[in-house]
């Protein structure tokens, strides 16, 4: 192995990066994927409902925005918990 590679490998994998950092990265990715999936399901259902009953579009849109905001807030809380794990 050429000189200097041991130091690079040591700094990447042995420099205080433990299982908590790995778990925080996996957790952050999963919570953001879950939030995106939930919002996409809400949007699909809202479009389907609006297509079936166009006169109820405003009520459906309001419910969709409220539900999306709640899911987004939950995703941000989960992301914050993961970041706190990583910085601990």
Image (spheres, rainbow, N blue to C red):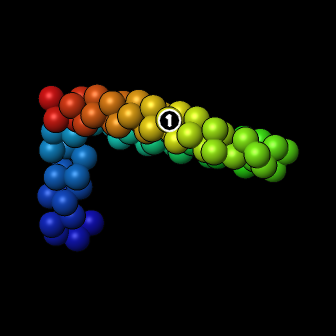
Quick check: 85 left or right of 61?
A: left
Above or below for 48 versus 2: above
Residue visible at 76% across and 46% down?
Answer: 55
Residue furthest bottom in the image: 2
Above or below for 41 versus 3: above
- Picture quadrant where residue 18 is located: top left
Quick check: 25 left or right of 57?
A: left
Quick check: 16 left or right of 33?
A: left
| Residue 20 position within the rendered picture, expressed as x and y whole percent measured from the top left | 27, 30
Name the foreground residue: 8 vs 33: 33
Judged from the image, the secondary structure of the residue bearing numbered disc 1 is helix
10 Å crowding of disc 1: few (<14), some (14-19), many (20+): few
Residue visible at 16% across and 69% down?
Answer: 3
> What residue is pinned by disc 1?
66
| Residue 29 position within the rendered picture, expressed as x and y whole percent measured from the top left | 44, 42
The answer to whether one can see residue 3 in this image is: yes
| Residue 69 position within the rendered picture, expressed as x and y whole percent measured from the top left | 45, 38
The answer to whether one can see residue 38 in this image is: no
């Amino acid at each position: 192995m050429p000189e200097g590679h041991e130091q690079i490998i040591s700094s990447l994998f042995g420099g205080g990066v433990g299982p908590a950092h790995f778990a925080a990265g996996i957790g952050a990715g999963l919570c953001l994927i879950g939030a995106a999936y939930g919002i996409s399901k809400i949007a699909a259902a809202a479009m389907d409902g609006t297509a079936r009953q166009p006169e109820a579009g405003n009520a459906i849109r309001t419910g969709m925005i409220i539900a999306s905001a709640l899911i987004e807030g939950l995703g941000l809380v989960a992301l914050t918990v993961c970041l706190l794990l990583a910085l601990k």
